[in-house]
Amino acid sequence: MTQRTIPPHARMIPPHARMIPPEAQCVFVGEIFSVYQWPQRLYDGSVATFEMVRRPDTVFVIAVDDAGNVLVNDEEQPGGIVRHGHLPAGRVDPEDATIIAAAQRELREETGWEFADWQLLEVVQPEPKMEWFIHLVLAQQPVHHMPPQRDAGERITTRAISWQELVQSAVLLRHFPWLRDVASVEELAPRHRGSL
């Protein structure tokens, strides 16, 4: 069985997403990744084993401070993972009631900030062989700051950068290339409001 429990209304799937078929069998379950296989009929009538990977969805948060700058993290994790100028991001947990709730939790854990205005901008499937979606969320109107609640395996420093600096990020543009055409944060929300 390939079904998994998704929090109500938590997952938005892009129209052309490639999903693991219902007949697939799970052959491996790891901490993050699960591997599924199924028999697939080929054009010549023969059958081959096809495979896809599933992992929890991810949220990326564009958090805009009162000065109009965007919060980013410089992060280090065990195993040599180092990221500079990366949006606050993380996995959608099964306990998250919605994608926005996951984004709020991740932003609060990594930066300590809470915001009043939240908007889902876009959902993409970055790899066709993975049932995995990245949700880009906009957070505006900061209302409260508290100490971050980072995981034991995270060293994070949060800083604010300009919109122009943000849209130079190769990671961000790889997943959301349309951002290079957005001149400012002010253009972002009206441009994509109601587009999902």
Image: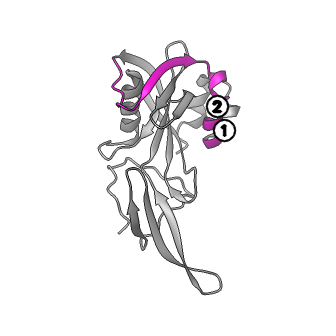
Rendered residue at 49%/27% (across/down): 75
Disc number placed over residue 169 in the picture, else none: 2
Where is 196 relative to 116, above or below? below
Outermost residue to the top: 67
Which residues fall within the magenta stretch?
147-175
Quarter location, residue 170: top right
Q: How many marks?
A: 2
Where is 122 relative to 67, above or below? below
The answer, for residue 17, to whether it is visible in the render is: yes
Q: Closest to the observer: 73 or 117?
A: 73
- Name the element at disc 2: loop
Q: Locate the N terminus by quadrant.
A: bottom left
Q: Closest to the observer: 153 or 43?
A: 153
Outermost residue to the bottom: 45
Quarter location, residue 164: top right
Rendered residue at 59%/24% (across/down): 185
Along the horizontal axis of the image, is 142 left or right of 127? left
Residue 119, percent from left and from top = 47, 34
